[in-house]
Amino acid sequence: MHSDPNATIDGLPENARRPLEPGEQYIPVVPDEQVHEVTTRSVVMGLVFCAIFAMAAAYLALKVGQGIEAAIPIAILAIGLGTFFSRKSTLLENVIIQSIGANSSHVVSGAVFTIPALYMLAADPLYDVAQPQIWQVIIVSFLGGCLGVLFLIPLRYHFMVEMHGEFPWPEGTATTEIILSGERAGSGAKVLALSAGLGALYDGLVASTHAMAETITFKAVGLQQLLAKQFMTIRVLNNAAIVGIGYIVGLKYAAIICAGSLLSMFVLVPMIHAVGVYVPDVLPPGTMPIAEMEPMQVFKFYVRIIGVGGIAGAGILGILSSMPAMIRSILANMKALSGKKGEAKKVVPRIERSLSLQVTIVGTVIFMVAAFLFFSYGLGIEKAALYAGVGTVLVTVIAFLFAPVSARAIAIVGTNPVSGMTMLTLIITGVVMLKLGLTGGQGMFVTMMVGGVVCTALAASGALASDLKVGHWTGATPSKQLALKFLGTAVAAVFCGLAMWVLSQADVGQGFGTSAMPAPQASAMKEILVGIFGTTAAPLQWYLFGLGVGLAIILRMAGVPALAFALGMYLPMELNTPVLLGGFLSYLVGRSKAGESKPRVKARMDRGVLIASGLMAGGAIMGVLDAIANASIKGITGSTEAKGAIHILSEHAFEGMPGEIAGLVGLVGLCILIVTWARRAKEA
């Protein structure tokens, strides 16, 4: 497409985001030619960003209870810093920088979701749990990250090529548009920059200054009061970045995702409450009688578990459906390996070169040996060979089953349900360890270490899928992206472990699980361990999980994308409703009038994607800045509040009627601006 790698690039090819016609081929932005890609500059910059963002993400996730997505900020930094060199960074160098640096997010998310739970348990004398050592955190993160990469290697062709145009890839789309903006000239770059500024301004007004309500509950128009009589609630997160995600996801998947939320909040929550009011006892996993619960509490303790079951069921069904593609990949690799000596080898184009199945097989064997040794001798448990062997098998099997689920979830909605799958891993592992006779603190420690490896592996699979899609669209070499992922994982694991160890040395009352460092995801994981291994905790409710699995099977039989629906059931409603709103805006922009030319419609859709990508980028940057500022001032002032330290207005200044009205007006105005701006695009 562009023989000169330094030529001005307008955007992705027309067929980048739609299914290909029979015989049609996708030609990436930088086709099969030798350009600067993996250079000293791109590798060093990627590793530096990986180290910095790993420490920052760990600190923010634990200190403020808010994680960051590193891909977009790193892409922007790569473009900006690349202009200071004597030779401007090429498009593919920026892809490599972003791909390496993005390791920071998934390694950190895997670690902070799990390991802090062990620090919390170790601080409580009621549980005989050892405190994790820094080298243990590093090894867990590194092993998990490598496993996630290994299991996605044989699925690369399926997700990138066979499923081309089938998924929206919201995060990958935004990252790609940001990287392409460094090569653009003219209106495209201007639209992206302006929309990023709009996203940062809007989300800053909502989250940082509280000029509008952050969550709209429609109390101002009386809808919330009407629904409350039926024990229902409707919530919309007033967030420009999530509206942008919904725009890229599109109306079809956005509607399916939101339908899952509607089933949860309008059917299951009222139904469970209606039955629960006649049960005076506490029904586990709840902590109070259902009659005393609010709708969101019923969702958290009961309905969300059904969503986890739905994700698991949909994931298993998805694995079965993708099995033919995996078998084809395995057979193709075996055929290539068994070729006769002396035969002329087929020259594989650069943009199609990937790591072979041998890498996955050999790498998995090495992983299993390393994991077995770590679980046997690295956890401080005597005669642990049996537990180590079982733990290694569980890690490998569960990661193998759920790695495609993570990739598919990222492809559909840009959100990885890794916490739900990790909870399921802890339950399965904990029950198995109990059957093997491992109880108490040692059982908790081993179970959480297994969960930490799986959690990091699943986070790595999802993030890698998005990175590979960016590379597929732009023309990066898959084998180089995959190989460098192992290096990036090692660096991210080391610096994540360092950050977590430093934070774990806080004074009493300032550690993990306190108001100073809430670590909310890990707190939930801790409660699961206590529920399994504790002597007084009530048993977990497996039938809720089974209901979710059954629902996934029914959805599959009905032809409804089960994973998208289950994600909607699992994620809070306030996250899914703005996704639906963004999908509806995409429909309005793409709707054509009678006699309107296809190029005109395409111009509108292209501009709409640019605007949505900019909103996501601006919102991500503002989220990072807001979290850093809050955490910094929190440390200086000693405030125990996780939010509110730097807000210009009081956090409660716009609650109630004024905030609702301001939020509704602002959100409607944002939607009108997006549609109007996109529909004014002219034919190229």
Image (cartoon, rainbow, N blue to C red):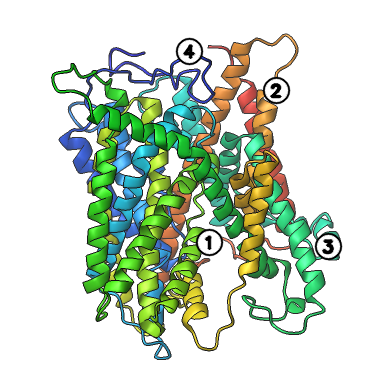
Q: Which dot, 2 or 1, sits closer to the camera?
A: 2
Amino acid type indicated by mark 1: His
Residues at badges 3 and 1 in contact (C-beta under 8 Å)?
no
User: Label 3: which residue?
Assistant: 225
- Residue 76 percent location from the top left of the image: 36, 38
Closer to the chain start, of discs 2 and 1, is 2
Neighbour class for label 2 at 10 Å: few (<14), some, many (≥20)? some
Closer to the chain start, of discs 2 and 3, is 3
* Quadrant in the rendering for residue 631: bottom left
* Quadrant in the rendering for residue 86: top left
Cα distance between the residues tagged 3 and 1: 29 Å
Mark 1, secondary structure of its residue: loop
Residues at badges 4 and 2 in contact (C-beta under 8 Å)?
no
Amino acid type indicated by mark 3: Gln
User: Label 1: which residue?
Assistant: 647
Cα distance between the residues tagged 3 and 4: 56 Å
